[in-house]
Amino acid sequence: MPEERVVEREDLSVTHSSGSPDWWIYRGVGQVVDPDVRDRHWPMPPPSRRFAGAPDLPVPEFDLTDSARHLGRAPFAGFNRPEVLNRVNAAIALARPLLVTGRAGVGKTALAYSIARELGLGRVLRWPTTPRSTVQSALYEFDSAGWIHAAEPRDRRSVGDFVRLGPLGTAFLPHRTPRVLVVEGIDLADFALPFDLLPVLADGGFEIPELARVREDPEITVRTADPGGTARIGGGVVNCHAFPLVIATSEGERDLPPAFRRRVVHLELPEPTVDELRLVVDAHFPEEQGAFVDSLVDLFVQFRAEHAVADVGRLLDAVHVFRSSDQIAADPARRDEVLRVLWHDTVERT
């Protein structure tokens, strides 16, 4: 994967468009901000949202391979609508979670990767929720059976070998800049899950009783959700420094509790415009240009309007298949047959 190009942006107010708000730290322009510039412009959170976890841990490097699956290989500037930027930057300034709703495939998870890449916030943590997901398991897991059957004589300081922080717990480790955590499909989780999240979101941390009971060692090393990652936990308590940027996504399968919604910034992510769809294709297939892309985008917009399907991944699938065959692109009958397989058949099965 190519290395990211870092762009020095001392005057953040002029990089997006003339007259854009100077309080925006995230611009959605697809360029990586110089870390020193970012730190000088990073907003101070309200007093009630300041936390004192320490010492700060190094931030794992941004995963370019993982990012390319969501944003493409080239810089992507498809999230620069004012209504999107206002709400993203409000969540950052207030140190509050961002609830991103919208139809499947409009780019809810991709937005999280865009923020992490542009602001240099390191590897994105992901928590895909299901009806069986619990906040407890997303915070940490304790292998009690392994601990019980550990070799004797038991060294209690080795209890950390049986503790692994989940994506939620890892996000709340102390860092100088926020970690980005995507809670995917929170509307698919059990109704109680948003309520169970509230104490962690309010306190900026949590306790691990299995570690707190160990008095012989004030700090115990545990594994984290980052590949090969470890962290030392003091007193069995995890406290954040910079509150993580928690991005919860929802397709509106059910309403979320008012108590949860009051504590988040809500963004309804709109469907990409024609120009934004071209940007998406350009980011994933930078070598493809011109009428070939324009024709597929136009066909996708027509398909989207007729079938109420917004999944941009279907458009990217078509580009990938069409670019491999001159016959498909040149023959309308073959083109329509391929699109029926890629687009229409999937609609009929849902």
Image: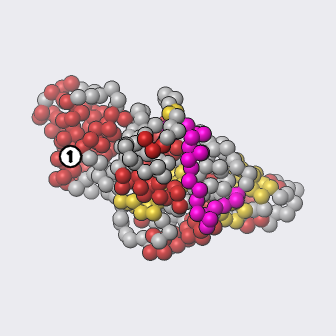
Q: Is residue 274 above or below residue 282?
A: below
In which quadrant will I find the C terminus?
Answer: bottom left
Query: Which residue is the extreme one toward the bottom?
Result: 258
What residue is at 62 percent from the left and 55 percent from the top? 242
Mark 1 packing: few (<14 Cα in 10 Å), some, or many (20+)? some
Residue 172: x and y, percent? 63, 57
- Position above or below: 32 against 160: above
In the image, the segment drawn in magenta is: 32-53
Q: Which residue is mark 1?
A: 301
Residue 35 located within the stretch drawn in magenta: yes
Q: Name which residue type carries label 1.
A: Val
Quarter-wise, where is residue 34 in the image? Answer: top right
> Residue at 13% across / 29% down in the picture?
331
Q: Position of residue 210 (x, y in %)?
A: 74, 64
In the image, what residue occupies the spot 46% across and 49% down?
22
Q: Is residue 302 magenta?
A: no
